[in-house]
Amino acid sequence: MSKLIATRAIRGAHKLVARAERELEEALKKYGPDKKVEFPNTGYFLPISHGMLGMEIDTVGKLKPLLKKAQSLLPPIPAEKVWVPYLGHTMDAGMATLFADEIIEALKYLQDPLPYILMENCPEEGDFWLGAADDVIMRKRGIEFVDGTAPGFAACVGKCPSTEVAVKIARELQEKNLYIFMSADNNGASMADQLREAGVQMGWETRLVPFGSDVTATVHALGFATRAALSFGGVKAGDYARNLKYNKNRIFAFVLAFGEVDDEKHAQAAGAINYGFPTVSETDIGRILPTGICTYEHVVSPIAPEQMVAKAIEIRGLKIHISKVPIPVSFGPAFEGERIRGEDTYLEFGGNKTTSFEYCYTKDLKEVQDNKIEVIGPEIDDVKEGDKLPLAIMIEVAGREMQDDFEPVLERRVHNFINEAQGIFHMGQRDINWIRISKESKAKGFKIAHLGSIIHAKFHDEFGAIVDKVQVKLYTKEADVLKLREKARAAYHQRDERIGSLTDEKVDTFYSCTLCQSFAPTHVCVVSPERTGLCGSYNWFTCKASYQINNRGPNQPVPKGDMIDNVKGEWKGVNDFLFESSRKVLNRFCAYSIMESPMTTCGCCECIAAILPLTNGVMTVSREFSGMTPCGMKFSTLAGTVGGGQQMPGFVGHGKRYIISKKFLLAEGGIKRLVWMPKMLKEEIKETFNKRAAEEGVPNLLDMIADETVAQTEEEVVAYLQKMNHPVLTLPPLM
C-alpha cells in the first residue's frame, strides 16, 4: 500500500474531525442541544450515521455521540518514514471522515441563508448547489438503480484541467448512463462551475448533480449509496456489514479526482474505499493495489483525464451496455430530462402550436423495408431558425412474433427513446406530443430523419425478439399530417376500447414482475389487466410483450388457476406461483384487498395506501408528496416501513392508475374508502377519477376526499368527512 496515501488520508481525517468538533461546539453555544437538525425532507435521519451505526440523530445535541465515534476511529498519523502494509488504519480514518463530514454538512442546514437550494434541478442563473438528495428524489431515481438504467455513479471531486475537458468527461459519463455527483473545489472553482460556464444543464434530471463546493459535500454521494441500501436493499439501520457489502456488489460507483488532491480529499477517498468504491486520480497520489476491499485496484494514479473514465470503469468491474444509435449527437438515458428552452430551439413540432402525432402499427413482412427512413416534406435545412412544422411519425413494424396488442407498448417508448438524444426534447404521446430540436444539435448535423434513426435502432435493440423490420416515415406537410392523424386517432380509439374492456375475468393468465427482487428478495408484483405494477411502468400488455421478448426475464406468466375468492381477488394458481417466486416465504395473495394478504411492496411504488382507523377509510400518498400524512408518516417513512418485500395488512403499495380501476380495494368497498390524498395527486387523476366515481354513483367524490389543504391529522380528516357527508361514513367497519 502507498505510504503517501495512508499518511495523507489519516492526516486529512484528523483535520476534518477537528473541524467537526469546532463547528459542533459553536452550534451548541448558538442553538443549544435541542435544536432540530436534519437533511430536509428525508426519513432516514442522517444517512451514514443511521445506516452504519443505527443512530437516530435529529437534534444538535445528538451529534456529540457521532463525533465521539469519529474521534475513536482516528488512528495515529504515521511517521514520515513508516510504511503501513495494510489498509485497516486508512479505512478507519475514512469512516471517521464520513462521520465528520456528516456533522459538518448537517450543521450547514442551520445557516441563514442556506448554502444549498432545496430543489431537484439547478436554476438557469444564481446558486446551483443542491446538497443532500431528499426522499422524493431518492424514490424517483431509485428505480433506475433497480432496473439497471443507472448502474452506478461517478463522484467527481475537484476541478478539471479545462472547461472543455469537464464537458467531455460529463458527456462520456452520461452516455454510459451513470450519475455524476460533483463536490469540492480547487482554488475556488469546481467541475460544476466549469459545466455552468459551458452552459450545461445540471440537476437530477440530467444526472449531473452538484452537491456542494466544500470537500465535505462529497459525503452526500456516499449518503445516497447508503440510503439506496436502506430503501431498496432491505438493509436494516446499523447493519454496517450488509450495508457495505450491498454497495460493493450492487452500486457500481467510483471517485474521479481532478487537480490537486489535498489531505482532506485523500480522506474522502479512504471513506469511499470502505464501500468498495475505488479512486482514479489525474494527479500522482500513488497507488493501492488489490487487497480485498474493492473489486480490483483501490487507488490508481496518475491517469490522463481522457483515460480516467475508462480506467475507473475497468477497475470497478462495471459492465456498460450502450446501444449505438447512428446520430450526430450523444445518446443515453442521462439526456432524458434535458430541457430545451424556447430561445435555444431551432425547430419544433406540436405542443399545441402545430399538428403532431406518433403512431406505430403492424404491417406484413413483405411490406416493410428495414431501416428505410423517409422525410416527406421539408427537412430541417429547408426551414429557418425558430420555425414550427407539423409532424406525423408513422412507424411501420413487422415481425413473425409481432402482435397488434404490442403496438401501444412500442409506441409509448418513443417518448423515452427520442428524449435520450442530447439536445432533443419530447413530451407527451399519441396526438398530443411536442418535440424540439435545439440549435446546438442542428449545428452538429441533426436532421428530422434522425428521429427515425433513433426509433429504428432502439426498437431493434429493445424489442428484437418480436420486431424483425422497422421503417419510419416522417411527414412534415400540413395536409399529409391532418389526413394521417385521422387514421391514427381511429386506431387510438380502437386500442382504448380493447384495453378498457379487458378485465381480470377475461384472461386466464396474469404476469409477474420480479425486477425489484435484487433489492427486495421476497417481493413479487402480480400484474393483471386491471392492476398495474407498483411502479406504474408495467401493465399487463407490457409484461406480456416483455415475456415475448425474453421468456426467462422478470415478467413470467402466472396461470390464475381455480378461483378462491372473486371479491378479494384470490386464485390458487397465483398463490402457488407466489410461494415459489417469493423463495417460499409467502403463500397467499389477495389482489383486491388492503386488509387481507395484500401485495408485497418493494421500494419503487408510485403510491402507498394506508388505513386511517378513526375514519373507517383509507388514505393514499404519492411519492412526489414530501409532506406529513394523516397516518403520522411521510411517504419515505411509509416506504421504509412496508417496503423490502413485506406483506403488511393495512398498507399496500400501488400504481397511480390502479386508483381508478374497478378492482381498487374491491374487498373493502372500492374508491368509496378513499378519504385523503395529496392535492397534487387529486389534480393528476381528476378526469379519470371523476368518470370512475360517477360509475359508482358519487360523481363529486373527489371533492369529498380530504387533502393537505383541509386536513393534516386523522381527526381533521374525520371532521372533513362529516362536513362533506362522505360515503365512507355508511360503509361497514374496516376492522
Image (cartoon, grey):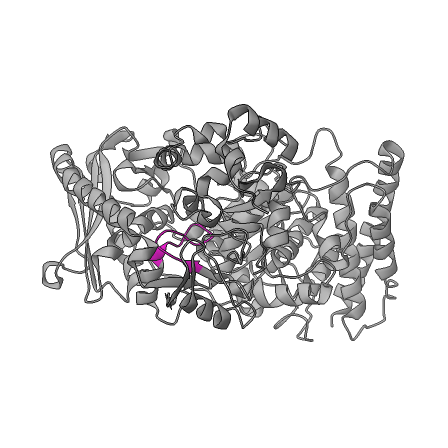
- Seen from the viewer's position, the closer of residues 642 and 240 is 642
- Seen from the viewer's position, the closer of residues 101 and 525 is 525
Q: Position of residue 727 (x, y in %)?
A: 48, 33
Question: Going 55% across and 52% down the picture, which residue do you hit?
Answer: 595
- Seen from the viewer's position, the closer of residues 397 and 724 is 724
Whether residue 218 appears in magenta in the rendering, the answer is no
| Magenta: main secondary structure | loop
Location of residue 211 (image quadrant): top right
Please, is residue 100 above or below residue 195 in the view? Answer: below
Location of residue 543 (image quadrant): bottom left
Q: Position of residue 648 (x, y in %)?
A: 59, 56
The answer to whether 470 appears left or right of 560 in the picture is left
Q: For residue 683, say whether it is visible.
A: yes
Q: For residue 161, say whether it is visible.
A: no
Please, is residue 465 above or below residue 380 in the view? Answer: below
Q: Which residues are magenta?
A: 526-542
Q: Position of residue 455 (x, y in %)?
A: 27, 53
